[in-house]
Image (spheres, rainbow, N blue to C red):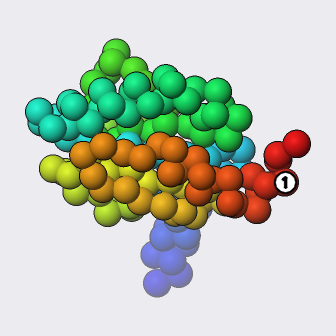
Amino acid sequence: MRLATLALCSVVMACSPLWAFADPDPLSAYRWTHRLLVVHVPDTEAGRATLEALRASLHDRREDVRARDLLIIPVGDLPRAGDTLPTAVALGATERLEVRRRLGLHDRVAQLVLIGKDGGVKARQTQAVFDLAGLLAVIDTMPMRRAEMP
């Protein structure tokens, strides 16, 4: 019995450093430094149109996006690798799946999720054309953003 307990403790101690450094939340690295706009767009005709409209909005409002420390996190089928969005962060396939699971994003529906610097979900949009101006207005009501404003 004593030998079995010792063997079990040795295995647990050997593996525990691996568990200690594993962070199950792929977005935690951005907490307190950036606001995140998680973008889930399916690879459909409607999804491609939605992505193009979002890309144009981000381009038109790029200074507003930068001023609000906003990073874009694509987690859907689109955009594909090499087809970038302004201020986008590329996640691996496993990380994208984990973010979709955590945020309850469904495969065939285009959705945006705004995440504050504190890591909390602040707004969601599910529609054919996303309202970037509306999301920027939501950000401007946040206490941390108000403290950042000149």
Residue 89 visible in the current orientation: yes
Residue carrying label 1: 147
Coordinates of residue 112 in the picture (x, y in percent): 39, 50
Q: Is residue 129 above or below residue 9?
A: above
Coordinates of residue 32 in the picture (x, y in percent): 72, 51
Identify the residue shown where x is 49% and y is 23%: 59
69 to the left or right of 37: right
| Image quadrant occupied by the C terminus | top right
Q: Which amino acid type is shown beneath numbered disc 1?
A: Ala
Q: Is residue 29 above or below residue 60?
A: below
Which of 2/13 is in front? 13
Identify the residue shown where x is 59% and y is 57%: 138
Element under disc 1: helix
Q: Quadrant of residue 143?
A: bottom right
Coordinates of residue 149 in the picture (x, y in percent): 82, 46
Count of numbered circles on the image: 1
Identify the residue shown where x is 55% and y is 70%: 9
